[in-house]
Amino acid sequence: MKNPVMTASGTFGYGTEYADFMDISKLGGIIVKGTTIEHREGNPYPRMAETPSGMLNAVGLQNKGVDYFIKEIYPAIRAIDTNMIVNVSGSSVDSYVACAEKIASLEHIPAIELNISCPNIKQGGMAFGVNASSAAEVVRAVRKIYPKVMIVKLSPNVTDITEIARAVEAEGADAVSLINTLLGMAIDVESRKPVLSTITGGLSGPCIKPVALRMVWQTANAVKIPVIGLGGISSWQDAVEFMLAGATAIQIGTYNFIDPTIAIKIIDGMNDYCDRHGFESAARLTGALAKNDA
């Protein structure tokens, strides 16, 4: 990777949508929109709601399916000079495997992010990510047919995220990314009804950063594979915090909607920080957290 700054799935489209705002080839990587084996319409509207310092979403993995991605999207993104990574999801082990197998044939897609942590679909998704045995099962199955880099995206909606991380590491995950959204809800007091059609949805944005940072630190101390940190990153300072806590790379999500150029600003800010503090590269920040003196 050119640098440790990536954009999170579901917040950056297929990358081309942001090309008018920045040189997207300067990014370390782009995690493209969640892709499933079949066409999905997603959940009924309303499926997004603003919250204090964040947002709820219940989009439900709306996409036109992997065959459409291969035919229509891949030709438009294959030449982008950065790591184009596909977020793969499913509702069963077989559907994860089928989707990943098709993506594996694409020469210019060097990795997938296996999404076992989406809280917005009724089947699969988060169901696989909240239990160590089911997480291990889907990773084991995909590992058998997917020869490239496999990142596994973890759910924060668990008692012990390190248990899940160790389980997927044991089954061949090359890296883990965390956290996905926290499960939340909002109510319209005038109508006395839930704001979202699905009642609950995924909470993201700056409000979840302290939780995400804690989980990244815990996971980085529990596994030997790289940890990719995300959750509420809105500045270079946030990104540096995640790196110091043990992240090898970071992803920017919700804040892309607020400032489409935030990723470039974070890259520049991290470079300046490294220069000021004598780090020869951003990679040296990983796990460089100094303990408080007793």
Image: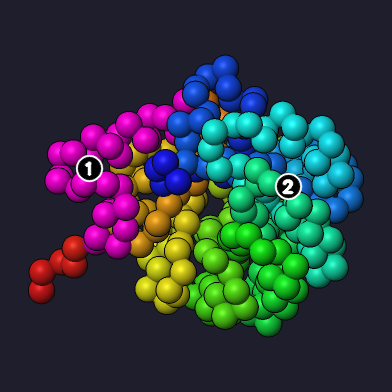
**87 on left or right of 39:** left
Q: Secondary structure at mark 2?
A: loop
The kind of residue tagged 2 is Leu
Residue 1 picture location, percent across and down: 45, 46
On screen, 289 above or below 34?
Answer: below
Left or right: residue 206 versus residue 76 is: left
Q: Residues within 10 Å of mark 2 (few under 14, many from 20)?
A: few
Q: Residue at x 82, y 47 (%)?
A: 66
Span highlighted in magenta in the image: 261-289
Instruction: Point out which mark residue 230 bears.
Output: none
Question: Vertical placement of 193 versus 20: above or below?
Answer: below
Please tell me how crowded label 1 is: few (under 14), some (14-19), or many (20+) other residues with Cα within 10 Å: some
- Please tell me whether residue 104 belongs to the stretch shown in magenta: no
Q: Which mark is residue 106?
A: 2
- Determine the image quadrant of residue 265: top left
Q: Is residue 149 above or below residue 87?
A: below
Q: Is residue 179 above or below residue 235?
A: below
Query: Residue 135 falls in which quadrant of the image?
Result: bottom right
Residue 233 at least partly seen: no
Within the image, what quadrant is residue 45 found in? top right
Location of residue 37 in the rendering, given as x and y in whole percent from the top left corner: 85, 53
Q: Which residue is the site of mark 1?
A: 274
- Whether residue 238 is visible here, answered yes or no, is yes
Considering every residue shown, the one lying at the far top of the view is 20
Q: Main secondary structure of the magenta part?
A: helix
Disc tally is: 2
